[in-house]
Image (cartoon, rainbow, N blue to C red):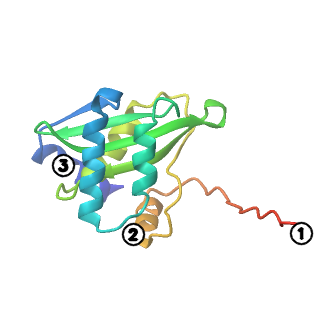
Amino acid sequence: YHKKRNLIKAFIQSNTYTAKPLRSEFRSDALQVLDEWQQGSGIQGDYEAAREALNAMESLQLCGGIYYVDSRPVAYVLGEELAGGTTFVIHFEKAVPGYKGLYQFINQSFAAILPEVYEYINREQDLGEPGLRQAKLSYLPAGFVEKFKLVVPVTP
């Protein structure tokens, strides 16, 4: 993890940042991050699902964190507890472009504040995007959850 530590260190040394729990009062900031992420990436990706999750985070019992650089919202993480309280699933992790080491920083920062009762952090699927898959594999995952698709035949 030497490269990741260097990126985190570079981010910390280059930026004045704050982190806050992602509550409804910061929803508009998280939506701003999401919009900037989408504009900067030029792909639709999971944009609609991420927007829906932010708008319904209380009813879905999702929690997370939001990160600011010089009072500007630059990233957020949103997820939930699963597997009987042994796993925290990160559904969405979004950041605006232009901050070297920001993704590595929020990944480490958010993981550091999670309670120790969690045995695993599930980073979810890579949506078939090679760069995202490579980034997730670089954290040397403990394993993968096999996914299945169930198709129920329609009887005439």
Crowding around mark 3 (Cα neighbors within 10 Å: few <14, some 14 to 19, many 20+) is: some
Of 102 and 143, the residue lying toward us: 102
Q: Quadrant of residue 108?
A: top left
Expressed as whole percent of the image width and height from the top left, the position of residue 114 reads 44, 31
Q: Between residue 135 and residue 2, name the one nearer to us.
A: 135
* Mark 3: amino acid: Phe
Q: Sort mark 2 into few (<14), some (14-19) or many (20+) by Cα contacts within 10 Å.
A: few
Closer to the camera in the image, 50 or 16? 50
Sequence-wise first label, 3 or 1: 3
- Circle 3 SS class: helix
Q: Which residue is mark 1?
A: 156
Residue highlighted by disc 3: 11
35 up-or-down from 12: above or below: below
Between disc 3 and disc 1, the foreground one is 1
Image vertical order of residue 148 relative to residue 116, above or below: below
Q: CA distance from mark 3 to mark 1?
A: 60 Å
x, y (%) of residue 4?
A: 31, 55
First of labels 2, 1 by sequence position: 2
User: Which disc, if any, is residue 131?
Assistant: 2
Q: Secondary structure at mark 1?
A: loop
Q: Is residue 150 left or right of residue 40?
A: right
Tell me which amino acid carries mark 1: Pro
Image quarter where the N terminus lies is bottom left
